[in-house]
Amino acid sequence: MTDMPFSPTWIGIAAAILTTAAFAPQAIQAWRTRSTRDVSLTMFLLMVSGILLWLVYGILISDLPLILANAVTLLLAGAILVAKIRFR
C-alpha cells in the first residue's frame, strides 16, 4: 500500500470539503428567500442527528479532520433545519 500514487487522507479531505460545501447553497437560499417549502423536515432532523453523532465520534477518537468537517456541516445543516422550523 505504500506504493500508492495518492494519499487516502487527501481523498478524505476532498470528500469532507465537497459534502460539507453541498449544504451551503441550500442554507443560503433558505435564509435569503425565507422559504423551505420543498425541504423535508424529517430528512433534515435525521441528517442533523447523524452529523451530530459523527461530530461526537470524531471528538471521542480525536480525529481533527472528522471534527472540523462535521462541525461545519452541522452548522450549515442546522441552519437549514432552523430555517425549516422558523419559516413554516
Image (cartoon, rainbow, N blue to C red):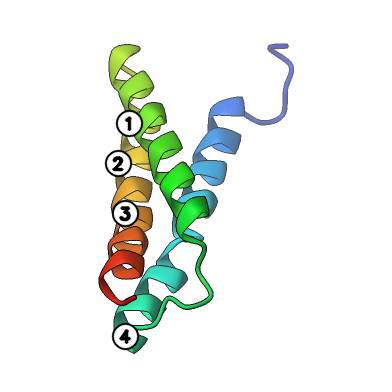
Residue 57: which quarter of the image? top left
Number of the front mark, 2 or 3: 3
What is the distance, in whole Å, between disc 2 and disc 4 at their CAs? 22 Å
In the rendered structure, which amino acid carries the disc numbered 4? Arg
Cβ atoms at labels 3 and 1 below 8 Å apart: no
Instruction: Tell which circle, 1 or 4, labels the residue nearer the N-terminal end.
Output: 4
What is the distance, in whole Å, between disc 2 and disc 1 at their CAs? 6 Å
Instruction: Tell which circle, 2 or 3, labels the residue nearer the N-terminal end.
Output: 2
What is the distance, in whole Å, between disc 3 and disc 1 at their CAs? 16 Å
Task: Specify few, some or many for label 1: CA neighbours under 10 Å numbering under 14, 14-19, or 20 or more.
Answer: many
Rendered-image quadrant of the C terminus: bottom left
Check residue 28 in the rendering and tell me which mark sits there, or answer none: none
Task: Specify few, some or many for label 2: CA neighbours under 10 Å numbering under 14, 14-19, or 20 or more.
Answer: some
Check residue 71 in the rendering and tell me which mark sits there, or answer none: 2
Number of the front mark, 3 or 1: 3
Q: Which residue is mark 3?
A: 78
Number of the front mark, 2 or 4: 4
What is the distance, in whole Å, between disc 2 and disc 3 at their CAs? 10 Å
In the rendered structure, which amino acid carries the disc numbered 1? Ile
In the rendered structure, which amino acid carries the disc numbered 2? Ala
Q: Which residue is mark 1?
A: 67
Q: Which residue is at the front of the view, 32 or 72?
A: 32
Residue farthest toward the front in the current orientation of the protein: 88
Q: Which residue is mark 4?
A: 32
Residue 24 coordinates in the image, percent (x, y): 41, 66
In the rendered structure, which amino acid carries the disc numbered 3? Gly
Rendered-image quadrant of the N terminus: top right
